[in-house]
Image (cartoon, rainbow, N blue to C red):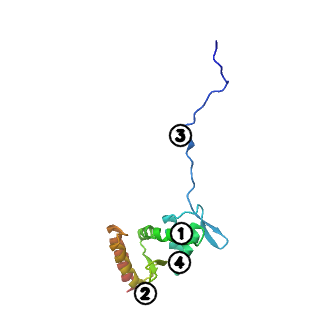
Amino acid sequence: MSEITTGKELVLTPPEALEKRRSKPSLLLVGRRYLCTDGRFHPDLAAEYVRTNARKKWLGVGELSKVFTGANTIEGKRRVRRNLFSVFSRVLGYGEFLVYETDPSTGRIQAVKLLDVTSEQERQAARPQLERMRQRHQVSAENYERAVQVIELQERLRQ
């Protein structure tokens, strides 16, 4: 007796061939506003967005939430605030300092902007912000030293 065959052999695909390749997330201009292509918060992408749009004006947490989560919701703002410290580190890596504007009653971050050496108000806000971040262990010792150097360098450039 012979075995029953189907006439086709079973071919197994190697696992490497089954891997899905994702494209890198990017910002897409839709109308007059930008949206993240996958609707998630990416610190590297956010750092680039802040570096291009927050030199002369304050970017509100709501605006960042619209760009990176697609909507200005409470949960979106929480996600942005939770990740701003990683954005701070990325921006610091470029040799710039990210200043936070906080609500005096709650202490929540309301807006962000790159440090402008000509603004006395921003320079005065930078040091206490950095000390608060150090006390809360939100910045590493290496990044703390780098941030102090950036602030001092920018203060010397102003003089």
Q: Compare residues 132 and 22 and report the one nearer the observer.
A: 132
Q: Amino acid at mark 1?
A: Glu
Question: Who's the residue at 46% across and 69% down the image?
Answer: 82
Q: Is label 1 in a helix, a strand or a loop?
A: helix
Estimate the spatial distance between the alpha carbons at disc 2 and disc 1, rounded to whole Å.
30 Å
Comes first in the chain, label 3 or label 4: 3
Q: Nearer the viewer, mark 2 or mark 1?
A: 1
Quadrant where the N terminus lies?
A: top right
Q: Amino acid at mark 3?
A: Pro
In the image, residue 78 lies at what x, y percent?
A: 50, 70
Comes first in the chain, label 2 or label 3: 3
Q: Compare residues 49 and 65 and report the one nearer the observer.
A: 65
Q: Are marks 3 and 1 in contact (CB under 8 Å)?
A: no
Q: Is residue 6 above or below residue 126?
A: above
Comes first in the chain, label 4 or label 1: 4
Question: Who's the residue at 51% across and 63% down the image?
Answer: 42
Q: What mark, if any, has residue 59 been given in the picture?
A: 4
Q: Would you say 128 lies left or right of 72 here?
A: left
In the image, residue 9 lies at what x, y percent?
A: 63, 27
Comes first in the chain, label 3 or label 1: 3
Q: Which residue is mark 3?
A: 15
Comes first in the chain, label 2 or label 1: 1
Question: Who's the residue at 34% across and 76% down the image?
Answer: 148
Q: Which residue is mark 2?
A: 121
Q: Are marks 2 and 3 in contact (CB under 8 Å)?
A: no
In the image, residue 44 lies at what x, y percent?
A: 49, 64
Q: Which residue is mark 1?
A: 75
Estimate the spatial distance between the alpha carbons at disc 4 and disc 1, rounded to whole Å.
18 Å
